[in-house]
Amino acid sequence: MGASEPNGSIPYHDVNPPAEKLAKVAKKEWPFRLTERGVEKRIEARDKELGITTVEWRWFCSRLEVSAETRSSEGEEWGRLLSVTDRDGRVKTWAMPMSMLAGDGTAYRERLLSLGLIMAPGKFARDALHEYISTAQPGDKARCVGRLGWELETFVLPNGAIGDHSNG
């Protein structure tokens, strides 16, 4: 993680969960799965004539993990801690404000693409990415701060924190 995130927030809860942990997050109703290749959405199609339902997993972006929910020490400015694996295999982390989901999504997609995310073209991929980020329930939480130094009982450094950050 760099000294400062693009949105001015500095996450001080180092979260890098393994894929097995993310699998427990995906409830049966949640139509997404994370694979080595990327993120896929389950598409069900019902054939009325044959009376069968087929399931297809459709890829829409390269590997993107929703690692944690983020928020300020005041319990505001909620967001998602996202980890993008680029084409060189490097993991880039970004604390994305949830407020970026309020518009058409261009701003957060631009940022993710600049970090190395690969997206399928078209409306399906845009909508699936939006749904994936907004409905993920990662289980972990992280506190984002706007500056280095003391934040409650924790001293925040560019690449970590010292002190009690158990409520982070």
Image (cartoon, helix red, strand yellow):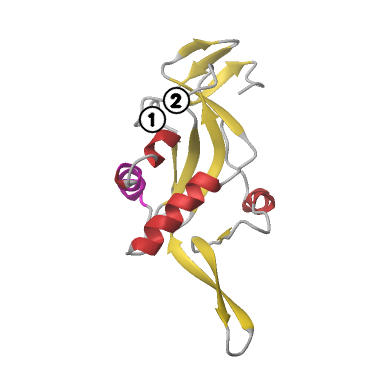
Give the class, few, some or many, for how many residues have Cα within 10 Å of label 1's Cα (few <14, many ≥20). Answer: some
Q: Earlier in the sequence, mark 1 or mark 2?
A: 1
Return the residue nearer the eye: 20 or 167: 167
The answer to whether residue 87 of the structure is visible from this angle is: no
Check contact, mark 1 vs mark 2: CB within 8 A.
yes
The location of residue 41, given as percent across then percent down, is 52, 63
Is 25 situated left or right of 39 in this image?
A: right
Name the quarter where the C terminus is drawn: top right
Is 29 situated left or right of 112 in this image?
A: right
Name the quarter where the N terminus is drawn: top left
Q: How many marks?
A: 2
Residue 99 within the segment the image draws in magenta: no
The amino acid sitting under disc 1 is Glu
Q: Residue furthest front?
A: 48
The location of residue 161, given as percent across then percent down, is 55, 20
Q: Magenta stretch mostly in which secondary structure? A: helix
Q: Quadrant of residue 27?
A: bottom right
Q: Which residue is mark 2?
A: 10
Q: Which residue is mark 1?
A: 5
Is 116 situated left or right of 136 in this image?
A: left
Q: Residue at x 48, y 52 (%)?
A: 131
Q: Residue furthest bottom?
A: 50
- In three-dimensional space, the C-alpha distance between marks 1 and 2, rounded to whole angstroms, equals 6 Å
The location of residue 45, given as percent across then percent down, is 55, 76
Q: Which residues are magenta?
A: 107-116
The amino acid sitting under disc 2 is Ile
Q: Residue at x 48, y 19 (%)?
A: 157
Give the class, few, some or many, for how many residues have Cα within 10 Å of label 2's Cα (few <14, many ≥20). Answer: many
Q: Residue at x 67, y 48 (%)?
A: 21
